[in-house]
Image: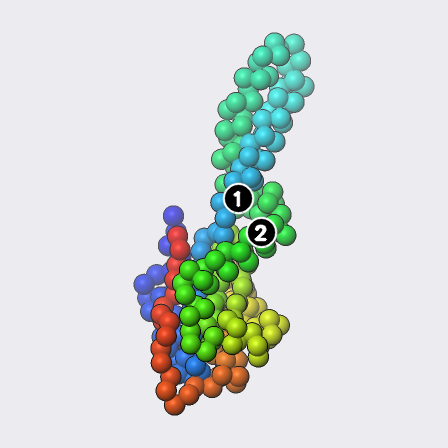
Amino acid sequence: MRIILTSQEKEAISRAILEAEKKTNGEIVPIVVRASDSYLGAHWQSGILAALLSAFSAYLLFPHWNPIGYLILQIPALFVGFLIGSIPAVKRILSGKKFMQLEVHQKALELFYRHRLHLAVDGTGVLIFVSLLEHRVEILGDRGISSKIGQNEWEAAVNDLISETKKRNLAKGLIRAIEDCGVLLARHFPAKHENPDELRNDVIVEE
C-alpha cells in the first residue's frame, strides 16, 4: 500500500503550520485519511451484480444447462464481484456522490472532536480534512472561527488543496491550504501578545 506522506513531507507540513500560526491565535490541524468509510454496501452491490450477470450470460451461451449450474456459477462470481467493489473508481460510482459527501462530513466531525480541536481556549481550532478515496476536502472551524469566517471564505484553501491532490501533490496542496488558512486567520484572529500553542503542529495521517 502506497505511503500517503513521506517523513520529509510531514516535516515540511509541520513547518508550514508553525509559520502560519505565528501570525494568528488560530490552531490549524490537518488530517488525512485514505477513506471516510469502508463503503461495504458497494462491495455487495458489485458482487450481486456480477453474480446476476454471470448467470444471465451463462444462460445465453448455454441455455440447456441444468438450472443448478447457473446457481453454482453465481457463487464465485459473487466473490469476484465483491473484490471488484474494492476498486476506488467502482466504489465511488456505486456509493454515489451524495452518500460519500455525507460520510466525509461525518468523518470530519468525528475527527474534529476526537483530536480535541474543540478544546482551544478561544474556540479557534481549524481542521483541514482530506479524504483521498472520495477526492473530498473539508475545512471546519470551531465556534470562535465560524462566528467570523463563513464556509465560503475557505474556498481558496479548499480549491488549492483539491487542485494539488488531483495532481498527486498532496503535501504541496496541504502546505498551500495551510498558508491560505493562515492568511485568513491572521486577518480575523491576529496573534495576541501571548500566543500559546494549544494543539499539535503536525499532520495526522490515518491509514
Identity of the residue drawn at 53% across and 56% down: 106
> Callout 1: few (<14), some (14-19), or many (20+) C-alpha neighbours within 10 Å?
some
Q: Is residue 96 above or below residue 120?
A: above
Identity of the residue drawn at 40% across and 63% down: 115
Q: Is residue 4 above or below residue 88?
A: below
The image position of residue 88, as x and y in percent, is: 52, 46
Secondary structure under tag 1 reads: loop
Mark identifier at residue 148 = none
N-terminal of the two: label 2 or label 1? Answer: 1
Q: Is residue 138 visible?
A: yes
> What color scheme is it?
rainbow
Q: Nearer the viewer, residue 60 or 46?
A: 46
The image position of residue 139, as x and y in percent, is: 53, 67
Tell me whether the residue at label 2 lies in contact with that at label 1, contact meaning CB atoms closer than 8 angstroms.
yes
Mark identifier at residue 39 = 1
Q: Amino acid at mark 2?
A: Met
Q: Is residue 204 above or below residue 121?
A: above
